[in-house]
Amino acid sequence: MSLYNLCIIGNPVHIISQEDTFVCYYPEKISFPITGHESALFIEDEKIYFESWVEEGWNDKNDCATDNYDLYYKVIVKDFSGNTLSEEVGDLYQAADGTWWIA
């Protein structure tokens, strides 16, 4: 078990860690690769909701933004096998009552 990025998410509770691989330790073992830009936010109805940041127009050679630079977020929904079910530009937010919305 990797204790790096170990956290509790979801309803019911899931114990996970994530870096280059999403791993669920409890209540069932789930593991699949993710990008370094993806981060699991919650699990519900056997779907894992990820937030991913996308950076376009970055000049790696000069380590600086170009005139076409853009940074935005996507919500990616995956099943327990790691298959992408949906992808939408936006960011997830959680209300005080626990409900989530995308904006």
Image (cartoon, helix red, strand yellow):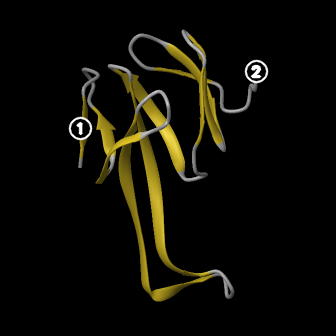
Please give the residue where the numbered disc 2 appears in the rendered image: 1
Name the residue nearer the viewer: 32 or 17. 32
Residue 87 locus on image (x, y percent): 32, 49
Look at label 1 and name its amino acid.
Trp
Residue 6 image-quadrant placement = top right
Relative to 19, residue 70 above or below:
below
Picture coordinates of residue 46 (x, y %)? Answer: 38, 21
Of marks 2 and 1, the one in the foreground: 2
Secondary structure under tag 1 reads strand
Residue 42 position, x and y percent, is 42, 28
User: Residue drawn at (48%, 69%), measured in percent from left and top?
Assistant: 55
Q: Position of residue 96 (x, y in %)?
A: 27, 25
Amino acid identity at mark 2: Met
Q: Tag 2's secondary structure?
A: loop
Disc 2 crowd rating (10 Å Cα; few below 14, some 14-19, many 20+) is: few
The answer to which of marks 2 and 1 sits earlier in the sequence is: 2
At x 57%, y 45%, the residue is: 34
- Say which mark, if any, is on residue 101: 1
Spatial separation of the CA atoms under disc 2 and disc 1: 32 Å
